[in-house]
Image (spheres, grey):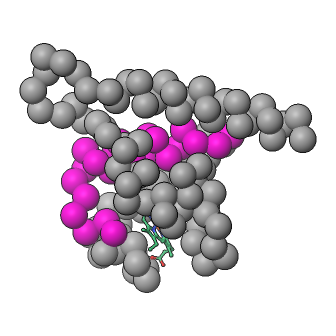
Amino acid sequence: MKKILMCAAVALVTYAVVAQGQEGHPGHPGQPPGHGGAEHFEQYCSGCHGSDGISGAEHIPNLAGQKKEYIALQLRDFRDKKRPGTVMPAMAANLQDSHIEGIAAFVSSLGCGR
Ligand code: HEC
């Protein structure tokens, strides 16, 4: 129980830091690489994978705590049709590399894994 609470606390702090780091960069036109991973995930991915990266459905994988490089690789593979899937190829079809980096960084910051 204690461990779970600790994890939740760590996740919250990480979320705050990530969200803060992505709150726009005044004076810098264009988006820095990895910008908006948290927002993108919340908007397009959390419905299935959960806001905290823990999915509520048996057939949808948890993403929290997954390695950043693994997440990025899976998204590129779905997009580039190297990995088959039910919904993910369509979900990843329009992602650019900079989006993928941002999403992967955010997802890997969720939960306790590293
Ligand atoms: C409609 C539900 C749905 C949405 C929306 C969705 N996913 Fe998925 N995701 C799945 C399912 C189901 C799988 C298993 C592979 C498949 O069948 O396509 C999966 C697999 C994945 C995997 C691979 C996990 C692993 O362990 O290999 C990643 C990474 C992922 N999704 C990220 C995302 C991201 C990022 C978004 C938002 C851009 C997203 N998903 C949106 C349902 C969804």
- Horizontal side of 9 relative to 92 (left or right) equals right
Please indicate, yes or no, whether residue 68 appears anywhere in the rendered image.
no
Can you name the residue that lies furthest to the right here? 1
Occupied quadrant, residue 36? top left
- Look at the picture and state if 75 lies above or below 66: below
Residue at image coords 48%, 58%: 46
Can you name the residue that lies furthest to the top here? 27
- Horizontal side of 80 relative to 60 (left or right) equals left
* Residue 59 rendering spot, x and y as whole percentages: 61, 78
Q: Nearer the viewer, residue 96 or 67?
A: 96
Q: Nearer the viewer, residue 95 or 8?
A: 8
* Residue 32 rendering spot, x and y as whole percentages: 22, 31
Name the quarter where the N terminus is drawn. top right
Q: Nearer the viewer, residue 94 or 41?
A: 41
Residue at image coords 23%, 21%: 25
Magenta stretch: dominant secondary structure? helix
Occupied quadrant, residue 10? top right
Q: How many marks?
A: 0
Residue at image coords 57%, 72%: 60
Please indicate, yes or no, whether residue 56 appears anywhere in the rendered image.
yes
* Residue 65 rendering spot, x and y as whole percentages: 61, 46
* Residue 3 rendering spot, x and y as whole percentages: 84, 36
Q: Which residues fall within the magenta stretch?
A: 91-112
Name the quarter where the C terminus is drawn. top right
- Horizontal side of 76 relative to 57 (left or right) equals left
Occupied quadrant, residue 55? bottom right
Residue 49 sits inside the magenta stretch: no
Residue 98 sits inside the magenta stretch: yes
